[in-house]
Image: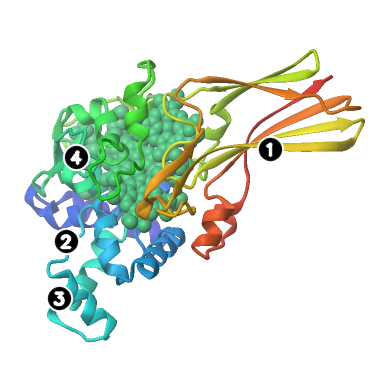
Amino acid sequence: MKTKLVCFAGLMIFLASFAYAQLSGAVTSSYVCFSCHKDQAKDWATTWHSRSHIDSNPIYKAMINYISRVTYQPEESILVGCAQCHNPKMTIKEISGKDSFNLAKVLNVETEQTKRVEASVGDANIKDGISCNICHNVEKINESMNMEMRGFKAVEWGPNDVIFGPFEDDGRAGIHKSIQKEHFTNPDKLCMACHFGGETDNKNGVELYATGKEFLGSDDTNQRCADCHMSTKRKGIITPEITRPGIVAKEREIRSHLFEGARNSDILKDTIALNAKPEGNNIILELTNLTPHKAPTGFGGRSMDVKIEFKNGANVVNTQTYTLEIVYVDKKGKEMVPYIAASIKSDNRLAPNETRKLSIPKFPGATDVKVTVTYRLVSDRILKLINFSDAIFSKDYPVTSLDVKL
Ligand code: HEC
Ligand code: HEC
Ligand code: HEC
Ligand code: HEC
Ligand code: HEC
């Protein structure tokens, strides 16, 4: 432990002794940021932003493999398109001469192009996903309603020796210059560079990931993405270990870097307010979406189950399940993954801040009812379709529950 501390202190001095321009290499690998910004690094590592590369997210990999099989294209041809948001700094942005590339891959022939594409996909500098050097290198955001203009197409990267952030530079960091940007003082726009959806002029006209569009369409303007998904602001000193002669550390309003989701936080507990009361021969359920986007939102495989159990004493006598989800289908009406679907068959997710009333006939003889809401990252049907299983994606995450006497 002691040696580690000595090494760490040594690294800090070594890093702090660099001049501004020397950070340039660092901006391509976020490991350099970790040594000084431990809190941000620790939080960020728990989020799936850190796992958006094919080598670290098994369902992303399985999804690409599935699309590759059903569209008869090599995985790399699919992945390059997905990287627009999942790995926006991947050097290859588009595969030119797709037919010859695809043929070379099918015949397993190595060409200059296949080597270049493989090297680009496997580049160590992009494997840490949506990392420090993605968000904090964004100098400008080009807003657009067009769904194609997301990820790297929505942003302009700044110079390599500058960090963009929420504060004005006071020179204390030393190793990097920093410039204050509005998309950090109010980060909604930054989040929506990737989490937006938008107008569809893609091949099939099917919208994906419409969280930002849902949010802009809601009346709720009080809570911003960062308030719920990072944390409320608190007072703190950034990297208190760093001291520079003549420069005094400022106390600032900072947030955590959790990008809270179902897997790394208890954010789901703040999704739905549940109410239930008996009324004549029915039980009236009220589900209120507490978020300014749909519930569930985001990736098309997400769903929520509302399970209604009628009980007689301790015995469950009847169970009914109501699922909130979006269902994508192919041309023949068969369920399909969002990316290659022909249309949306149904979408009964709760709209932003919607209160939905369900009237359910009482089950004869029941004395009590238990209502349980749970969240799924990926439905069983999608998992089966892409032939993938992993408990993280198939388990039920608790949202809320309620017991009512009939
Ligand atoms: C998805 C985008 C995103 C990623 C990835 C990201 N940040 Fe940030 N960061 C932000 C936003 C937004 C803020 C401003 C938060 C606020 O004040 O509202 C911020 C603020 C900061 C601050 C100012 C202090 C604070 O915590 O508020 C530091 C330092 C920082 N980030 C470092 C890092 C480091 C180091 C990493 C990588 C481990 C990282 N960030 C990854 C978006 C990001
Ligand atoms: C040698 C230590 C060191 C390294 C390495 C370092 N930083 Fe910093 N950084 C600091 C210090 C110290 C501050 C605080 C400045 C202050 O409070 O005025 C800071 C401030 C920041 C801020 C807030 C500034 C603003 O304009 O809002 C962000 C964001 C940030 N760093 C991101 C990064 C990222 C991303 C990396 C990696 C590319 C990185 N830092 C590497 C020491 C470092
Ligand atoms: C450069 C594109 C990009 C930006 C900018 C971005 N995200 Fe993400 N975000 C993604 C991708 C891609 C994923 C999915 C990663 C995965 O699971 O492989 C994701 C996942 C998430 C998740 C689920 C995380 C989890 O651990 O399950 C949340 C919550 C989230 N983002 C919130 C935000 C917020 C809030 C901001 C703005 C501060 C933001 N994102 C900015 C691309 C982005
Ligand atoms: C009032 C708090 C609140 C605000 C504001 C909010 N969200 Fe959420 N968000 C939630 C909750 C609660 C969930 C979990 C339920 C769901 O999917 O709707 C969630 C889910 C998500 C997910 C899916 C998480 C996962 O685990 O896969 C993403 C992505 C996301 N939000 C992005 C955003 C973005 C981008 C914004 C701003 C445009 C935003 N949210 C604004 C509360 C909020
Ligand atoms: C417009 C930007 C964008 C593009 C392009 C994109 N994604 Fe995503 N992807 C996201 C965001 C944002 C999330 C996180 C949403 C959430 O958490 O609900 C995500 C999440 C996912 C998830 C769920 C990951 C998890 O950990 O639960 C899978 C699987 C996925 N994407 C596959 C793909 C595939 C395959 C492609 C290409 C065919 C692709 N994505 C293209 C933005 C994008």
Residue 207 place in picture, x, y as percent: 33, 41
Asked if the residues shown at circle 1 and circle 4 are in contact, with their CB atoms under 8 angstroms apart, the answer is no
Residue hosting label 3: 113
Query: What's the residue type where badge 4 is placed?
Result: Ala
Q: Is residue 140 left or right of residue 130?
A: left
- As helix, strand or loop, the secondary structure at mark 3 comes to helix
State how far apart marks 1 and 4 are (Cα).
54 Å
Q: Residue at x 57, y 26 (%)?
A: 272
Is ligand 2 less than 8 Å from the beta carbon at label 4? yes
Sequence-first tag of 2 and 1 = 2
Binning the other alpha carbons within 10 Å of mark 4 as few (below 14), some (14 to 19) or many (20 upward) gives: some
Is ligand 4 less than 8 Å from the beta carbon at label 1? no
Residue 277 place in picture, x, y as percent: 74, 16
Asked if the residues shown at circle 3 and circle 1 are in contact, with their CB atoms under 8 angstroms apart, the answer is no
Query: What's the residue type where badge 3 is placed?
Result: Gln
Of circles 2 and 1, which is in front? 1
Residue hosting label 4: 173
Q: Is residue 173 left or right of residue 259?
A: left
Q: Is residue 253 left or right of residue 29?
A: right
Residue 38 place in picture, x, y as percent: 36, 46
Residue 137 place in picture, x, y as percent: 18, 44
Binning the other alpha carbons within 10 Å of mark 1 as few (below 14), some (14 to 19) or many (20 upward) gives: some
Residue hosting label 2: 94
